[in-house]
Image (tube, rainbow, N blue to C red):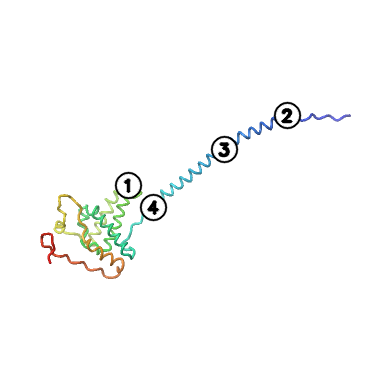
Amino acid sequence: MSKPEHPAPDTGSAAVRLAAEVEILRRQVEELVPLVGRVDELGDVVAHVSQTLAAVAARRRPAPAPSWLAAPAEQVAARGLLDELAVWLREIFLRYPDGATALPDCWLWHPDVVEELLWLMHAWLAAYQGADASVAAASDWHDRQRPGVVNRLRKAAGSCSPEAHQTRPGWSAPTGGPVPVPGLDAVEAITAWWAQHRDRMPPEPVAAQPSNGFGGVLG
């Protein structure tokens, strides 16, 4: 009895099927290529968002206010703090009548008063010009921070009487200009003392020279 013969494999059909499978795979790969690009784009977007959030978080960190009580023992740095403060006092703080009356002529001789004014200045800068400046921050400065400092200045160093207040140079000027910052002739002596010898007695204020009534000084 003879063995059954197996039919020869149809190589043509197999080749066709293989070619079809290759074509399917090629199309699938082509469909994946744009996805790879999208994944790369998505990675760039995530990195950009992360950097943006980090920058926003850095801006939202509250900036520290300088301290007069802990100012560096360096005269130029101390003078810089007082120069900036004097400009702000003239342009902002002394435009409020209660601020003008609460600031005594001897304010430079009261380190606690300088400290209060420095942080109040930086609170104003943060409320009006900082990265997180807002109406709410400005409202808090007006309603709580500034009145609190004014009240403490009155308790710590006293305030001017109405009679003394009316005799301030330029106070009754019709132009409505800023009130002069008192005691600025002592800035040099105060900064030298505070920067180098704050553990000693402060320098004595120089007595005001009498006026001849015509804008000059007697003597």
Q: Which residue is mark 1?
A: 134
Q: Residue under circle 2?
A: 12
Which of pointers 1 and 2 lies earlier in the amino acid sequence?
2
Q: Quadrant of residue 116?
A: bottom left
Amino acid type, label 4: Arg
The residue sitting at the bottom extreme is: 200
Left or right position of 99 against 59: left
Circle 2: residue type: Gly
Which residue was labeled with disc 4?
Answer: 61
Disc 2 crowd rating (10 Å Cα; few below 14, some 14-19, many 20+) is: few
Residue 197, percent from left and from top:
30, 69
Please give the name of the residue rendered at 52% of the width and 42% of the height, measured from the top-left corner: 40
Q: Is residue 47 above or below residue 198?
A: above
Mark closest to the chain's N terminus, 4 or 3: 3
Q: Earlier in the sequence, mark 1 or mark 4?
A: 4
What residue is pinned by disc 3?
Answer: 33
Which image quarter: residue 29?
top right
**Horizontal and vertical percent for residue 44?**
49, 44
Image point (34%, 50%), residue name: 130
Judge the density around disc 1: few (<14), some (14-19), many (≥20) Cα neighbours within 10 Å.
some
